Amino acid sequence: MAVEVLLPKLGLTMQEGTITEWLVPPGGPVRPGDVIMRLATDKVDTDVEAEGEGHFHPVVPAGTTLPPGALVGWLLAAGEILPGAVSGAGPSGAVVSGAVASGDLAAQPGPAGRLLASPNARRVARARGIDLVTIRGTGPGGRIVSEDIEAVDVAAPLPVAPLPVAPPPAAPLVRRYAETLGVDLATVAGRGPAGRIRRADVE
């Protein structure tokens, strides 16, 4: 009888976990206590053991991020077909689950189109204001890792245009006098109150 393998909940606050590596080949035999996968969460990385006996068939690729309780594989008896799957042979004789051949798991996208990214990569992306959709993952199964985020050059801020310099304070008569003499008031140091330019300053 087929037995579901679910993503375990490792703590009360765990919201999701990322399968970083499958440690049993598709169709490989396992017994209770055998380590079948390596799981990463925001707080801990741990090895997950099988709770039953049978031939293990993962249904999601390494690098997939899922909530606790999500289906990640099946334990089947010898010759048993995956529930709801069309039986077939993958490139290495592995059973095909739906459209996913166990030999091709690493090339498949995450469930429901979800981005595959490590918890740390998500934190780094948030801190740097980077949209994960624009990142090409280099981790297992195309998973986005923190190194992918750190390799992105964040666009430099646009240069801020300097504020126009206000002309020096001067009375209209002084301005006309300066124009008559051909004197640029920007070159004149005002010695009047609050730096105001006087006729004597222009002279």
Image (cartoon, grey):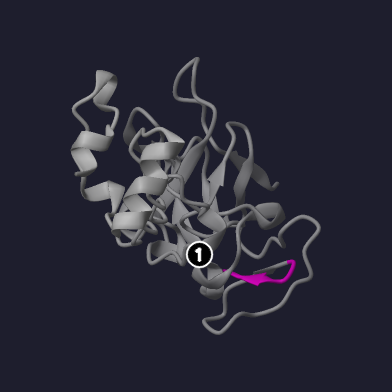
- Image point (62%, 32%), residue name: 69
Give the extent of the magenta segment. Answer: 98-102
- Image point (49%, 24%), residue name: 14
Left or right side of 66 for 144 = left
Residue type at the position of mark 1: Pro
Q: Is residue 10 among what the camera can see?
A: yes
- Image point (71%, 53%), residue name: 112
- Tell me residue 176's x, y (percent): 41, 47
- Tell me residue 80's x, y (percent): 69, 60
Q: What secondary structure is found at the residue carrying circle 1?
A: loop
Left or right side of 88 for 191 = left
Q: Is residue 140 above or below residue 54?
A: below
* 53, 17: nearer the viewer: 17
Q: Is residue 121 among what the camera can see?
A: no
* 90, 108: nearer the viewer: 108
* 188, 124: nearer the viewer: 188
- Tell me residue 28's x, y (percent): 46, 61
Task: Kindly indicate the quadrant of the structure image that contains residue 82.
Answer: bottom right
Residue that mark 1 sits on: 26
Left or right side of 103 for 179 = left
